[in-house]
Image (spheres, grey):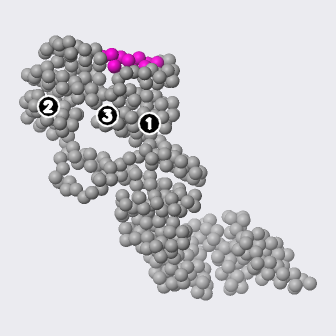
Amino acid sequence: MRMKNIILLLLAFSYSNAELDSLINEKKYLEIIEVADNAIKTSADVDDVFFKKASEVALLLDDLDKAIQYLKKSISIKDTKDYRDEWDRIVRMRKDIEIALKRYQEENDYEGAISELESLEYPDCALIDYSIGKIYQQEDEYASALESFKTAVRKNPYREKYSLSINYIIGKFITDGDEYYSMRDFSSALDQYLFADTNFSIDVNSQKVVDEDSLNESQLEELNKTRDQISKKVALKFKIAKTYYFLKEYSDSQEALRYLIALKKDHYEAYKLLGDVLKRLGDRDLALKNYLLAIDANENYEKAYLAVGQMYLSDNNIDGAKKYLLSAIDIKKDYAKAYETLGILYQNTSSYNKAIDNYLKALEYDRRNYKAMSRLASVYNSLEKYDLAKKYAKNCIKVKRSYPDAYYELGIAEKGLGSRVAAIDAFNKAKKSSKWRKAAQYEIDLIKKELD
């Protein structure tokens, strides 16, 4: 589509200096290159000034080959000392950069190559900074590469490959962060993410509502590019917020999420995570509000329904909890965590058979759900079915050897089965946890009295 527009432009273009100036004023530099190339190809009747201006635009884009080519055309039309001096300067610039790069490419002297490039006295040539950045990138010195690419973009914001190089380096830091995150090295992951975030600038004004039908193709292309950058920024902010959350730095996580939501108001995962953060910070009412906002943003987001159900359950709102937990299961039929929570609800209301059914469902969809195993042991102990209680307590311990809840239930089961020594052993292991210390010691004391 863009090429078609350029062809139409060329057909209508009379190659006058005035019209070239118009394109320059509009900063349509790539179109000027297309026009100048076509003027050469068609042997258009233009003067030396036309190609001199085209050469200046090419130099502005750091396209030294084009700048030399157009200047050569100017000289062929009108040979002047100024043109030849400019020709010599651009040729020398290109040659100096090539010599410095060969020092790296052929001699593997990267420090010498960078030093030589930095010593070149062409202050407005962003190609030098870009070349330095590429050397740093090849040497895996990404932070230094990024600074050089940023300098190149500041000098020349029109050369797309400069900004793409920045995006590549930022992406490298994000990828490294993802690798650390997958290894649960959250501190290292955060360092990588924050470095990327610091260097990831966006134009928030592009979030304003615009009439896209009123935009020309170039403007629409730029708008879409900016929106793509915003989407990437949103994704990065979410990674940062999650990492802060796992590091228990909840206030920082909250700040990242609020920034994210300001950019993307329908980010349902952000609302859910913000609810988790606020819950940790003790603001349960606002946490619940954000869980509900997550559902408003995505009515099929099962994790938000589970979160609301868990909140209602902890507040003893049984009907509300049941409604949202069942909704979560309607959305995700194999949602083990929702079945487990529903089992807790029924266990708390002494509906033991329903509790058992839901715990078994949880285990059907998650065979290593040790909490559901321990809770099954608890329900069976309540029903005095000690053999089944012992079975599930031991199953739990096979998966999670240090889980104190399972040891406590195993102690109750062994006691019910008459295995007092085994019961004491299980209670001793349970009381290593402060949660069970008093209860387990109480059971041990009762057994010892029976033995005396």
Q: Find residue 12 and report its image quarter.
A: top left
Q: Residue at x 9, y 28 (%)?
A: 16
* Badge 1 or badge 3: first in the primary sequence: 1
As shown in the figure, which amino acid type bears the numbered disc 3? Asn
Viewer-side residue, 166 vs 24: 24
* Badge 2 or badge 1: first in the primary sequence: 2
Q: Position of residue 59 (x, y in %)?
A: 27, 26
Q: Are marks 1 and 3 in contact (CB under 8 Å)?
A: no
Q: Find residue 60 and report its image quarter.
A: top left
Distance Cα–Cα, label 2 vs label 1: 34 Å
As shown in the figure, which amino acid type bears the numbered disc 1? Glu
Few, some or many C-alpha atoms within 10 Å of disc 3 (few <14, some 14-19, many ≥20)?
Answer: some
Say whether residue 53 is left or right of residue 134: left
Tell me the residue that label 2 is attached to.
20
Q: Find residue 431 and report its image quarter.
A: bottom right
Say whether residue 327 is left or right of residue 374: left
What is the residue that sits farthest to the right in this orientation? 452
- In this rendering, the answer to whether 235 lies above or below 1 is below
Asked if the stretch drawn in magenta spans residue 7, the answer is no
* Secondary structure beneath label 3: loop
Distance Cα–Cα, label 3 vs label 2: 20 Å
Tell me the residue that label 3 is attached to.
156
Q: Position of residue 403 (x, y in %)?
A: 70, 68
- Specify whether residue 161 is in view: no
Question: Please, what is the dominant secondary structure of the magenta stretch?
Answer: helix
* Secondary structure beneath label 2: helix
* Secondary structure beneath label 1: helix
Residue range highlighted in magenta: 91-104
Few, some or many C-alpha atoms within 10 Å of disc 2 (few <14, some 14-19, many ≥20)?
Answer: many
Tell me the residue that label 1 is attached to.
147
* Badge 3 or badge 2: first in the primary sequence: 2
